Amino acid sequence: MNELSPEALREARTALADTVQRFARSEIAPHVTEWDAAGEFPRPLYRRAAELGLLGLGYPEELGGTPAPYRLRLAAWRALCRYGTSGGVQASLFSHNIGLPPVVALASDAVKREVVPAVLAGQQIAALAITEPGGGSDVAQLRTTARREGDEYIVHGEKVFITSGMRADWITLAVRTSEAKGAGGISLLLVPGDSAGLSRTRLDKMGWLCSDTAHLRFDGVRVPARYLLGAEGQGFKAIMANFNGERLGLAAGAIGYAEACFDEALAWAQQRKTFGQALVEHQVIRHKLVDMRQRICASAAWLEDVAARADAGDAGNDWVAEVCTLKNQATQTMQFCADAGVQILGGMGFMRGTVCERLYREVKVITIGGGTEEIMKELAARQWGIV
């Protein structure tokens, strides 16, 4: 599917977007406010998404997935975010998209067959655990350790802000396996969720209320050595490569959420009357909507360009800078549209249950997750030779 003709790709994108839109409108959007209040969404939603093939997009066919180019996957993700309108649902429902890629790339064939098919079928949940309480974006200084003892690794440490951390059956864990300083001593381990010595604490958040986000503690957790992903000391490179895919997904999602804010604001402006006429008939409101659309179109065009480069294997010298700055552009677009949407809705925009209110709270985590806005700029500055 990575070699689709332009016409076939357009047809596939249209068909997939229609499927995603129907799924999001019928099985996610009507329930989001209820799920936010409950602090979780039903686990069977994983299986339903898997039945539609959504969990397996971009994964090898032999592992239960459907190979697909970035332009197809990101279009599906953008549609899901636009019509599902909940970052909390999307973050947890698709947490495998940051937890599984290192497994697919680095695990043994036996471990891949053990783990990946069940996750893509919606039977199990995968998560990624990198961030630590004292580390934040400074991945190279992580402190969680994994000491080899015979055929096992003994893990001690903590991770925080872990999406799907409460439910995960498999945790792709960044650890330090040697005394080497900085990036050189970092490895990746795949930790079974039922491991003795693993404890989980749920975190309360400003947004993503129905997503389970956890603080994980590893107190002498024994992990079979066969779950080492790749070689010892090679984890940092794998983590950095994984970030590129995550950031592209965040950019696509942010554009979808921006569109959701525009959709709600436009509908409200067309039906809400003030001073004897619809809001949209006031120039100041029309201009706000145009400003929203302008930013959405610009961000979407940039996403298309970067996705096409990724599909063509054109990861040139400025690739990381492009992905980082695209992520900033898209999340800033979402932030602008969420703010403008709340303003157009007025008092209703301050009420729980509206799309703009929810996304106004949720946008901050998207500007932070996958690398903060400041880190994105720093990485871009270095790659572009600005410093």
Image (tube, grey):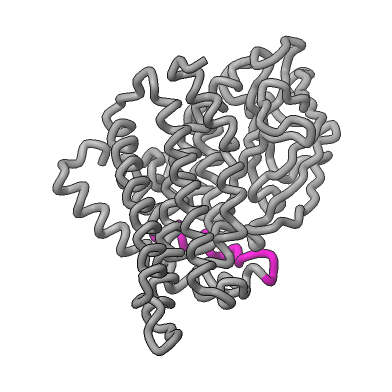
Residue 20 x %, y %: 37, 62
The residue depicted at 44 percent of the width and 45 percent of the height is 330
Q: Quadrant of the N terminus?
A: top left
Looking at the rendering, which quadrant does residue 225 occupy? top right
Looking at the rendering, which quadrant does residue 221 occupy? top right
The span picked out in magenta is 37-53
The residue depicted at 40 percent of the width and 54 percent of the height is 78
Residue in the foreground of this view, choosing between 342 and 121: 342
Residue 299 is a magenta residue? no
Q: Is residue 154 visible?
A: yes
Relative height, residue 192 to residue 55 (above, below): above
Q: Is residue 67 visible?
A: no
The residue depicted at 54 percent of the width and 40 percent of the height is 98
Task: Report the side of 374 relative to 249 (left or right).
Answer: right
Relative height, residue 339 to residue 164 (above, below): below
Residue 46 is a magenta residue? yes
Residue furthest out toward the top: 180
Residue furthest out toward the bottom: 276
Task: Report the side of 348 relative to 199 (left or right).
Answer: left
Task: Report the side of 212 relative to 301 (left or right).
Answer: right
Residue 27 x %, y %: 47, 71
Relative height, residue 226 to residue 24 (above, below): above
Relative height, residue 378 to residue 366 (above, below): above
Residue in the foreground of this view, choosing between 155 and 13: 13
Residue in the foreground of this view, choosing between 321 and 265: 265
Residue 16 x %, y %: 30, 57
Tag count:
0
Looking at the rendering, which quadrant does residue 156 occupy? top right
The residue depicted at 46 percent of the width and 36 percent of the height is 245
Residue 65 x %, y %: 40, 45
